[in-house]
Image (tube, grey):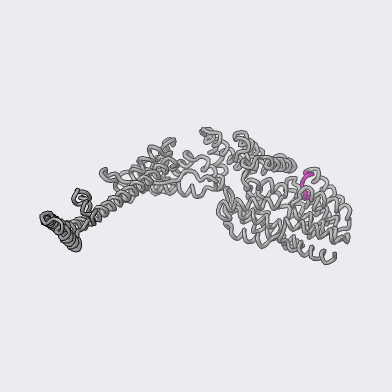
Amino acid sequence: MAEGLLGGLFGEDEESPDVELTSDSLIGAEAFASAVAADEAKREPTVARATVHFLREQAHILRLQSKFLADEHHLRLEYLRGQVHEGNLRRAGQRMRVAINVFSAIAVTVIALILSRMLYDAITSRSVVVQSFQTPAALAPKGVTGQVVAADVLDSLQKLREATRTVTKGLKSKSAWSTDVKIEVPETGVSIGEIDRLMHERFGHDVHIEGELVQTVDNGLALTVRGDNVPPQTFTGGAGDLDKLSTEAGEYIYGRSQPYQFAVYLAGGGRYKDALAFLPGAFARADKDSLRANLANVWGSAYTSLGQPKLAAEKFRLVMALSPQQSREWWNGWGNLLSVISLAEGEEAAWRESHAYLQAVDHAPKDRRPDLPQLTNPASITWDLPLALSAELADAKHNGGAGATSALDGPQIADVYGLMHDPVKAARYISASDPDDPGAKAETLLLPAYDALDRGQPQAAIAPLEAFWKAWQADPSLHLSYPDAPCLLGLAYGRVGRRGDAEEVFDHMPPLARCAAAHGEAHAREGDIAGAERIWADGVRLAPSLPLVYLNRGRWELEHGDLQNAQVDLARASAQAPHFADPLKSWGDLLLRENKPAEAVAKYTEALKYAPDWDALRRARDVAAAKK
């Protein structure tokens, strides 16, 4: 208490807001004064009176201070409440400012993202943009306006693009007004669509097409188109020929702006002569070796389809010469070369070239190997059916099921399954194919023939094979995919004793290993063993690396008890095509005939790796296993 009083006297703690003088404090001060006065009165009355007066004054001062502090306390509370309210308002304002700033930042970010996306789209744009055409006012009442004509040309381009089977679809087609989204940009009145169009014009790589439609003096129509790197061209026709003129104009624009895709479109649509007429000019106008290589590839394919394998081989070799080694184009050109070498230079040459291709694949760095679909031709030529199937399935998957990059995959997949003795999967893939495709039509005839020959019913195979033979003779495009399939008809004729009909078929076929194998068997079944041996020997000389002659001859030898020669031929067939199930299955049959069931089971089991759903093979393995 004394310290508190002295502090008040000497002015200490004057600014302390926490000091409060209560009534108890004042009472204590007065009691202290009385005690002091009583004590002093005993010694000195005058001092006592002065002391009492001083202490009473101090008590009065304490009362005043107490009242002041009480009043100040109320004011301080009001002030603090005000400060809290003001702080709340200040914090609410700060939150509002933060929210506005965040919203502004998000808005700016969104706008920046939109503009960035628009800029990216513009820089990467590869489109054919069709502007509104000029048309005479006299045609407007008939509904023929500039936008209508441009839309017709646009539709033609889009149909051409969709009908083109190729890895790269080429430039997209769109109208000049297709991006005109009317979202106004503040303070400018410019739409988002206009900004997008300006960006595409400044940074894009679009081809802009424009033109005009006029009436000729005889009331016909003349449609002129022109554009970036598209020289003016006029197409004329009658008053009702606008659709025809739009189609012709679309093809012209497509050919000039996307020569490779247009060439693929022509060849893929069976217009081989049109492709050959278009390709020389397109090749001369090409400004890059990569484009020239792609054009040469289509060029070779057109020659192939027209039955000119030597000219096709020249173009495929040109593809390889124009492409960097181990590039995709180089592998593709080489793979296509394999498909025509057998007709241009012989099957043995194709076989050896195919082995060289597969060895090159094995030795190439992994990042420079061809895609799996590009292994289709070498796998098929070497009778590696599982690899051929994997390649075809990979191509189909890449192109949406039974589709294809440049030809329909479904029929080829079905054919491989048929050769692997799996009619169920073969039927599944042929049923998923376009029924109007020439390959699909051919396979619907071949597959039942494969199955009938497998079941030992050659008579049932004759009708579908005769229909196939007729279609094959009428359509040169089937010669590439099925160069030797008609020889199965000769085989079926031979197995039912129709040797004359068989000879007529074989006389029309080129010298091919499958035909030699079937032809020899036909002679053997007629009892002409010497003739059969001569034909088989010619087939071996023709293509010593192919397995088919060894396989057919070995089966005949096995059937007639010549087990020693049969084993030689079947072992040779298996060595030439180690992933071909048929030689292994026949070899197992031979071992079972020799009462070697354990060895037969081993051959059957190995064969099942390459034809896992061959029912006859599974039954043969079960029989052999039961005899172990």
Q: Toward the viewer: 295 or 58?
A: 58
Residue 456: image quadrant is bottom right
Position of 537 with respect to 105 (left or right) is right
Residue drawn at x 67%, y 42% as measured from the top left: 361
Does 605 sit left or right of 98 as displayed? right
Tell me if I can see residue 22 in this picture.
no
The extreme front residue here reads: 43
Residue pictured at 32% horizontal, 51% vertical: 103
- In the foreground, 562 or 607: 607
| The N terminus, quarter of image | bottom left
Q: Is the C terminus in the top left, top right, bottom left or bottom right quadrant? A: bottom right
**Residue 214 lies in the magenta-colored region:** no
Image height of 253 relative to 487, above or below: above
Q: Which residues are magenta?
A: 543-548
Q: Position of residue 384 (x, y in %)?
A: 71, 50
Residue 475 visible to an observer of this rendering: yes
Task: State the residue at coordinates (18%, 61%).
Answer: 35
Q: Main secondary structure of the magenta part?
A: loop
In the picture, measured across the screen, residue 262 lies left or right of residue 588, that is left
Residue at 61% in and 55% down = 410
Front one among 403 and 315: 403
Magenta stretch containing residue 546, yes or no?
A: yes
- Residue 6 appears at what percent x and percent y? 21, 51
Q: Position of residue 46 (x, y in %)?
A: 10, 55
Q: Is 440 positioned to the left or the right of 240 in the image?
A: right
- Name the one closer to the observer, 423 or 621: 621
